[in-house]
Image (cartoon, rainbow, N blue to C red):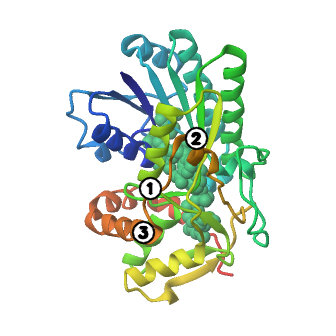
Amino acid sequence: MTMIVTGGAGFIGANFLFYMRKTHPDTRLICVDKLTYAGNLSTLATVMDDPNFRFVKLDICDRVGVYQLFEEEKPDVVVNFAAESHVDRSIETPEVFLQTNVIGTETLMDACRRYGIQRYHQVSTDEVYGDLPLERPDLFFTEETPLHASSPYSASKASADLLVLAYHRTYGLPVTISRCSNNYGPYQFPEKLIPLMIANALADKPLPIYGRGENVRDWLYVEDHCKAIDAILQKGRVGQVYNVGGHNEMCNIDIVKRICKALDKPENLIVHVEDRKGHDMRYAIDPTKIHRELGWLPETKFGDGLQKTIQWYLDNSKWWQDIISGAYQDYYEKMYGKRAEV
Ligand code: NAD
Ligand code: TDX
């Protein structure tokens, strides 16, 4: 079995490669990654010399390169993690999100049609459903919830999902889609809430909460997401969407306070800054379908997962300090320098 994993030098893709290496050692894994700012080859150091692993630096929008790779490797399965993934960046520069997240998905699926494939899996997000009101805790996203994206990022992911389902209906491509809630864990780029707050707290820098910090996300430990994708690849029905989440809703301010406590840092590092434009209030997944059909349930409790994550960032400071010492400084100044305190 040969599996192409795109975006494998990023956060979830890398964790998926490690999970697959451990649980399916006979699968040949081909990691395709453009190595954007979010891709980091050093993350893959432990698998790089594995004879059953190949890294290919390639843009998923590069049709000639993608077709050539399919000719060479004749993959059985493609799992597409490659994406521009940060909402704040999509608000600044939407174009690259449409390019990678929509055109890249189309290019990969065209290659799948041309060369044949057993499964194309699209890694999507709960953000395609838009948001839920804070005052209706009884509401959850199901697979039937209409797509109602808020940001250029989520609109690009929703567009890709529509295209994936259209390729199934029109060409009979054997596709599946997973729509997961917010992930956290090792190797997450420090632009996202949890690693950004850990890095800033360790440096005694301000912890910038957008608005009042009441926004709710449904957090899932990254390995639980990897297990869900593996279950969908093995037992999921083609043409189907599976929501992935663990009923673990937390508001941002509470998460940041927990990080302060775990690192023994004062809460007065927290500053409330100008809100994100179009900021989604609440995400909450109903995971009944994946539980009933595939028997998947999350295994890591939030307290344990957060502790493991914080410990990982403490033990691997070189990994993220190398990142934040480079171009990240310009990003930080651009994104946070102009956000007034509120
Ligand atoms: P990430 O930003 O950490 O990693 C993305 C990876 O894709 C990087 O290695 C980058 O170099 C690569 N990439 C970007 N453009 C590319 C291109 N044109 N060609 C090839 N490679 C390219 O993202 P992540 O957080 O690991 O997210 C992975 C996937 O999971 C994304 O599709 C995202 O939408 C989805 N998702 C993420 C979360 C989350 O909480 N992080 C939750 C649900 C779904
Ligand atoms: O500095 C910050 N301050 C802050 O208050 C940052 C970076 C974030 N936030 C808030 C915004 C969100 O309400 O924290 C929450 C989480 O923010 P992000 O980590 O940027 O994640 P989110 O916007 O929820 O999107 C994530 O989950 C769904 C991923 O980045 C997406 O790729 C995924 O699809």
> Which sits earlier in the primary sequence, circle 2 or circle 1?
1
Q: Are marks 3 and 2 in contact (CB under 8 Å)?
A: no
> 246 and 72: which one is in front?
246
Asked whether, in this view, residue 54 is left or right of residue 62, the answer is: left
> 16 and 9: which one is in front?
16
- Residue type beneath disc 3: Leu
* Residue occupied by mark 3: 306
Q: In this picture, is 200 found above or below 189?
A: below
Indicate which disc residue 293 carries.
2
- Label 3 secondary element: helix
> Which sits earlier in the primary sequence, circle 3 or circle 2?
2
Q: Locate the C terminus and report the quarter of the image it occupies.
A: bottom right
Q: Is residue 38 visible?
A: no
> Which sits earlier in the primary sequence, circle 3 or circle 1?
1
Disc nearest the viewer among 3 and 1: 3
- Residue type beneath disc 1: Phe
Disc 1 within 8 angstroms of ligand 1 (CB): yes
Crowd band around label 1 with a 10 angstrom C-alpha radius: few (<14), some (14–19), many (20+): many
